[in-house]
Amino acid sequence: MIRVLHTEWSDGWGGQEIRIIDEMNSIRASGIEVYLACKDASKIKVKAIENNINVYTLPFSGNADLRTIYGLIKIIKKLNINIVNTHSGKDTWVGGIAAKIAGVKFIRTRHLSNPINKSKINFINQIADYIITTGESVREAMIKDNKILPNKISSVPSGPKIEVFDPDLYDYLECRKKFSIKNGEYTIGMLSVLRKFKRHDRFLKMARKMLTLFPHKKLKFLIAGEGPQRDNIEILIKKYHLESSVTLLGHIENQAEFLKSIDLFILASDSGEGVPQSLIQALMMNKLAVATDVGSVRDLYHHKNFKMVNKNKQQELIFEVRNIIENIKDNKASELDNRKFIIDNFSENIMTSKILSIYDKLINQ
């Protein structure tokens, strides 16, 4: 029996934390025992318990937190853990060190696309038995810049559930009612944690421009998600006089219903992304989308299945959204076939299969 201990120091709830819980559930369904070590006051702890995942809490107060390292070693030995899988910076240090001391395999999952410090002092990635990234560009960067051996690193993007993100399961008009979208409104939406690198400011600037360009069209802009940038986003909404056109929905549980309700999906990030879960989900729901060329977004770009724009050029985002609005009748989302491409390449089943192969490789080395 393979037993995997996942670690996460973050106390937030976004794409990374969702990926961890989804991955643990899918792997567990394949017969792997999974456990989570995290902070006591973290949202991922609550979600793990809701999913009947055994949770252990530790401080995760720093890279050299001896109390957490010692605690992880005790958990590893008590549970006969085979693999420790770390996810963020701080828990990668303490989790990786604990795994090495305890003599078990150490997997480091890298969720973000931000460059990693090349200093020799930052050696934790080099001592990992295997590294998983959530996008091919992140994998290539770590091989080139951080000298990771190609046979020790793979890209395994997050995979949505086929049975959940199925546009045929949801009624367009009923979903729109849930989000108070009026009849005839053309709805443009973002779905993400409210973090700075998601660039909601650019989304709002685009919204202001569209309202100026199309004063007689019924345009509605929705922002789904919660996070540390909420206050700043509210300030910008007031500054740009968008109170009647932009709605902050806060955290939503059913992302598929939200995606069904909108007409156009926007990803405006300028950094930080692997292969964004929200864009994968939008494409699986056969939505029209405009996304910045950031992180590993290009992994999803298949026969121009969405509009991809320069992450540093606001005007490109404005141009593509304007073009779509001007040609609404020629841009019917129902005619897209993004779903098949995602199922064949980025679904939860694909993610699970790749991870199980990595486990098998490590355990049988």
Image: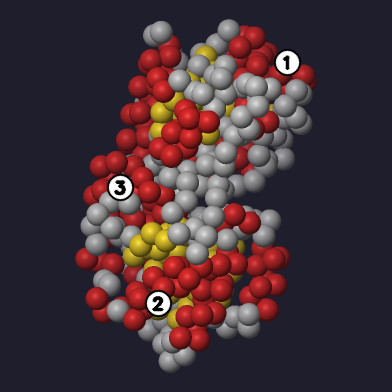
Vertical side of 352 occupied by 217: above or below: below
The residue indicated by pointer 3 is 342
Q: Secondary structure at mark 2?
A: helix
Could you tell me how far apart the alpha carbons at marks 2 and 3 are, in whole angstroms?
26 Å
Could you tell me how far apart the alpha carbons at marks 2 and 1 are, in whole angstroms?
56 Å
Could you tell me how far apart the alpha carbons at marks 1 and 3 are, in whole angstroms?
42 Å
Vertical side of 280 occupied by 360: above or below: above
The residue carrying pointer 3 sits among few (fewer than 14), some (14 to 19) or many (20 or more) residues within 10 Å by Cα, namely many
Query: Residue type at mark 3?
Result: Ile
The residue carrying pointer 1 sits among few (fewer than 14), some (14 to 19) or many (20 or more) residues within 10 Å by Cα, namely some
**Residue at x 63%, y 80% (from the top left corner):** 240
Q: Quadrant of the C terminus?
A: top left
The residue indicated by pointer 1 is 70
Query: Residue type at mark 2?
Result: Arg
**Residue at x 63%, y 75% (from the top left corner):** 237
Q: Quadrant of the N terminus?
A: top left
Query: Residue type at mark 1?
Result: Tyr
How many numbered marks, from 0 up?
A: 3
